[in-house]
Image (cartoon, grey):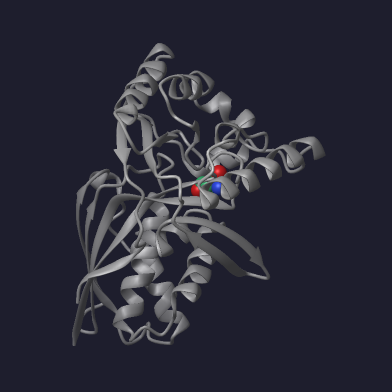
Amino acid sequence: MRRSITVRVPATSANCGAGFDVLGVSCALYSEITLTLTDETDEVTFDMTGEGANLIPTDKKNIVWKSVQFLLQRVNMAEKFTGGTIRMKNAVPLSKGLGSSAAAIVGGLKAANVIVGNYFNRSELLDLATEIEGHPDNVAPAVFGGFTVSTTENEKVNCFTFLPKIKLKLVAAVPDFPLPTREAREVLPQEVPRSAAVFNIGRAAMLVASLISGNERFIGDCFADMLHQPYREQLIPGMKDVIHAATEAGAYGAALSGAGPTMMAFAPLQGQNAVKVGDAMVEAFAQNGVKARAMILNMDTRGAHIVNY
Ligand code: HSE
């Protein structure tokens, strides 16, 4: 018996400035995963193309395969599907803060879920993905698309997803060096001052209010952060200069994308601003000795979806 499915999962940008571990946005840049499961072998074979293809593990430690197994075990079907094939066409830069691991996790879960007959709904898939990833802010937009606000209580994630009334281009400046999330979390303090918490709560709330209402009046002040960026600055040369360059070139604001090192600017959809913003960010990185490339992205509105079954 063999079952095969192809799913497509978007890249994501987490935090969006002040919304550390809470806010996320889905980007129209995809990882496409074809999963074949079988009981005819206990071997898994891999065929990787695209971004970081030669860096992705091709054994049972592969994160897509581990996520498939995670779901199969939850539905007591791991014995039934012992082996298979994973084919991945990946456009999401690896270890750059654009949700490559979230895309792999959600892709594995989504594909396996379809094969077992859609045992879990999307909200339950998000719970499983968060259990694997540890925080919901990348996996939530990867599952649902759009802009997401997530809260977690007793391992249950509540996710509000919406399409902003302020239309945005997402301008990523992607440095050529990777930064594992684990390393970028190790530099963060366990405790933060109350003033920093208040600073961020206000901005995260203001950003969501601005995006939902379509009122641009305060949006330029919403992307600053005191919970993680000041500590991560040592890992990303030129971080402040890149933010400054992006806003000077016409972006509403810019911030670290997830744990970095990519910087994400939020630019008005209309006009040529996005190209100017991207160029300015790449130039600011270059001034700080960092080689980077710009990616100008639309927001994804669908989240993980089936391409072929
Ligand atoms: N919120 C996470 C962080 C995103 O900033 O560490 C990275 O996956």
Give the quarter of the image for residue 60: bottom left
Residue that protrudes farthest toward the right in the picture = 194
Give the quarter of the image for residue 143: bottom left
Give the quarter of the image for residue 217: top right
Whole-percent x, y for residue 38 in the image: 22, 81
Quadrant assignment for the N terminus: bottom left
Q: Is residue 144 left or right of residue 55?
A: right
Residue 200 vertical position relative to residue 33 in the rendered view, above or below? above
Q: Is residue 61 visible?
A: no
Whole-percent x, y for residue 169 in the image: 36, 40
Q: Is residue 133 visible?
A: yes
Whole-percent x, y for residue 266 in the image: 44, 36
Residue 205 vertical position relative to residue 1 in the rendered view, above or below? above
Quadrant assignment for the C terminus: bottom left
Q: Nearer the viewer, residue 175 or 271?
A: 271
Residue 72 vertical position relative to residue 285 in the rendered view, above or below? below
Q: Is residue 14 left or right of residue 55?
A: right
State the residue at coordinates (34%, 54%). 300
Q: Nearer the viewer, residue 106 or 61?
A: 106
State the residue at coordinates (37%, 25%). 277
Whole-percent x, y for residue 10 in the image: 34, 55
State the residue at coordinates (31%, 79%). 114
Give the number of marks: 0
